[in-house]
Image: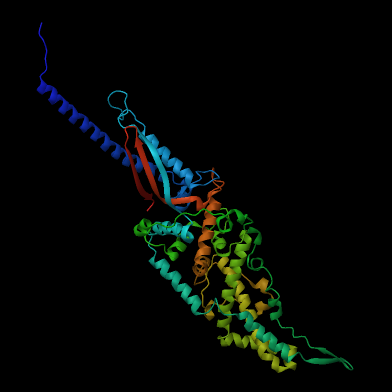
Amino acid sequence: MRRGYITVFLSLSLTLILSLVFTVIEGARISAIRMKFECVTDIGMNSVLAEYHRELLKQYDLLFVDTSYCGSHPSIANTEGHLRNFMQKNLEPGKGGRVFGSKDFLAMNVGLAKILEYSVASDGGGAVLKRQATDYMNDYPLSAVLDKITGNVGLLQGFGLDSTDVGAMRSGYEAEIEAIGLPEVEVEEGKYEEVPLNNPADAVNGLRGSGVLNLVLEDPSVVSAVKVDLGTYFSHRPGRMQGTGLCAEAVEAGGDANELVFQTYLFEKCGYYGEELDKSRMKYQIEYLLMGKDTDWQNLEQVAKRLLMWREVANVLYILTDSAKIAEAQAMAAVLSAVILMPALMEPVKYLILFAWAYVESLQDVKTLLSGGRVPIWKTAADWKTGINCIKNARGSLTQDEGGTGLNYKEYLQIMLFLQDAETRTERAMDVMEMDIRQTPGNAAFRMDACFDSFLANTSVSSRFGYSYEMTRRYGFY
């Protein structure tokens, strides 16, 4: 039988060796905890962004996370819960996370999962939303389109179509007739009556209070009858969610939002009269952006009124320079009994006939635009469609016209949208998005102000072995 023995030297050596081994193991544990903490934080924050709203991406090419998660109670606390859950799931040991038998080598748990900052779509007057839309449109060749829009706006403003008051001009001539008075003839001995003016322009003026759509559409019943409750949508809703605004990283990555590019984006994603979209709640979405009424009819009516106003200004300013048309109006005025008896009435009556003629031409212009035709901002004699006798039967003289030169209905809408207040346009754009998304399954309470595209999170983990670590990171769609 042999006896085993160990020397003092070997005992001391083993102590040192084991100390080194355990130190290395503990160092490995610390490094593994730090590395795994960083990995699960990245995975957790990326997983939060992976829950982007599918319908919003599908319909509007926007990447946002809905903090209600298809529910009715949006809150950033919901997202914090999701972040914590993603992190904790990735901290749980799997087949590759256990060493030394069944022991958990790291034994980690999530401590903090707090979102410190987040940018919702409506922050900064919709700056977050517009930045994403601008980034999306950067892939499109926009320079020619944008130059054309600004050129048309400059042309319209240069002619004063949005600032000239032709109503006041017309009222001046009516007041002149009132001041002159109508001639009187003796109908019986000692009894006099005014000679009626019988101005053919009066029939046209009687139409001015009528609804424009009823005058210019062949069949007004084809207009959409959709009505919505605006009180439930962003622009009218109290108690909106607010984030911390557009983050610097997003601005550096994508630049500032361009209003004109955003406007072009809206025309790509929204429908309008003659180009309605199947997905849309309100069929005339661009018209809603402009007028903000709760029915398609009212929105289209208000747009048609504005078109009529622009066209009337342009047509009045033109017709007053056309000597041939002025001569026709003078000849029509000259045969009126009251004018024959009182030649001083000739000038104001002539001008009222010209104003009426220009108004009927303007109705024809609006009818042409709504029929898919084109109308130039400033006309020549060749572009004029109506004859002077049309003022005797304005309704019957209007014709369907899908041709012509100049701008079409969409291009006139682009001018209107360009001239609109940017904040109002953006708020109504979010209304339209909410209307459309709420029509899809599971999104009945969808809100744009509940959607974020970037967030700053403070996270921490602790280990049963006495270690804890904390970090702050920002993730987002930029």
In this figure, what is the number of numbered marks? 0
Kindly indicate the quadrant of the structure image that contains residue 72: top right
Would residue 238 appear left or right of 34 to someone viewing this image?
Answer: right
Q: Is residue 32 above or below residue 182?
A: above
For the question of whether residue 335 can be seen, the reply is no
Image position, residue 101 (x, y; %): 29, 23
How is colour applied across the structure in the image? rainbow
Kindly indicate the quadrant of the structure image that contains residue 459: top left
- The quadrant the N terminus occupies is top left
Image position, residue 247 (x, y; %): 39, 56
Q: Nearer the viewer, residue 266 or 21?
A: 21
Q: Is residue 350 above or below residue 147?
A: below
Q: Is residue 392 above or below residue 403?
A: below
Kindly indicate the quadrant of the structure image that contains residue 38: top left
Would residue 267 appear left or right of 474 to someone viewing this image?
Answer: right
Image position, residue 353 (x, y; %): 66, 83
Would residue 6 appear left or right of 445 to someone viewing this image?
Answer: left
Image position, residue 392 (x, y; %): 69, 78
Q: Is residue 114 above or below residue 178?
A: above
For the question of whether residue 40 can be seen, the reply is yes
Q: Nearer the viewer, residue 262 or 367?
A: 262
Taking the spot 44% from the left edge, 66% from the top edge, the residue there is 260
Instruction: Give the farthest residue toward the front.
Output: 8
Instruction: Give the farthest residue toward the right.
Output: 189
